[in-house]
Image (cartoon, rainbow, N blue to C red):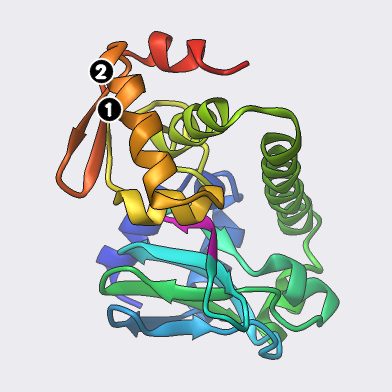
Amino acid sequence: MSASVVETISGSPWFSSLPPAEQSNLAANSTLVRINVDESLFRRGDPADGFYGIVDGRLKASNVRSDGKEAILSILEPGNWFGEMSAITGWPYAHDVIALETAQVLKLPLEAFHACMQSAAFAKLIAELLAQHTGLLYQMLEDATLHSTRARIARRLVRLAHGDATLAAGNRSDIQVSQDTLAMMLGISRQTLALELKEMASKGALALRYGKVEIVSMDVLKSFDD
């Protein structure tokens, strides 16, 4: 693996929290996989084959119904590591992971993953990663059952400002997500989303741009969280 790839993944919050020896071991045993736009890294029901970390590019985790309706669960950005549940349990993957743009992903094969799990430090951080991902699923369930449509939109935009699944400490003002994608993430129609975003924009929370949403005021946006 090239030094530039190792340097890039060293900026990942999860990877950087590993002890140096574990970082070196993971990097040495991983391979770099390139995925083109709309190609899948794996599909729902595929057998587990490794643990993954994104070097560059963005992917989506989603499920598609038999009638073609898609639910986007999360946007996965550089620094995200995932696939730990299936790697631990051997269960098939529970969703599709598909490239939204050309991406490079590190793959730690199952045999190497289980060898790394013999380290208490590595196993502890895998447990923390699994807990973080489980917490995100509970948040999504809470959003769907307890909050209004506008609050759900606001809450998801706040999470997207922190990298969605990454949950970085800092936040960004430009959210690179189309309205079609955001509607699929929330399970609402494109028309409903457009009306809500227009109203939120009129109150000074955000501005609508081509292919993205700009957060003008995080405080106003958070005020919609009922």
Residue 21 is at least partly visible in this image: yes
**Residue 8 appears in which quarter of the rendering?**
bottom left
Rendered view: 38 above or below 71: below
Closer-to-camera residue (5/141): 141
Category of crowding for the residue at label 1, using alpha-carbon neighbours closer than 10 angstroms: few (below 14), some (14–19), many (at least 20): some
**Left-right relation of 121 to 80:** right
Specify the quadrant that holds the C terminus: top right
Check the image and report above or below for 1 versus 24: below
Q: Is residue 5 above or below residue 225?
A: below
Q: CA distance from mark 1 to mark 2?
A: 7 Å
Residue type for callout 2: Val
Q: Are marks 1 and 2 in contact (CB under 8 Å)?
A: yes
- Circle 1 sits on which residue? 173
Left or right: 152 as drawn, with respect to 216: right
Residues in magenta, as a range = 71-76
Check the image and name the residue furthest to the right: 89
Nearest to the observer: residue 208 or residue 75? 208
Residue at 67% of width from left, 28% of height from top? Answer: 147
Instruction: Please tell me the numbered disc located at residue 32.
Output: none
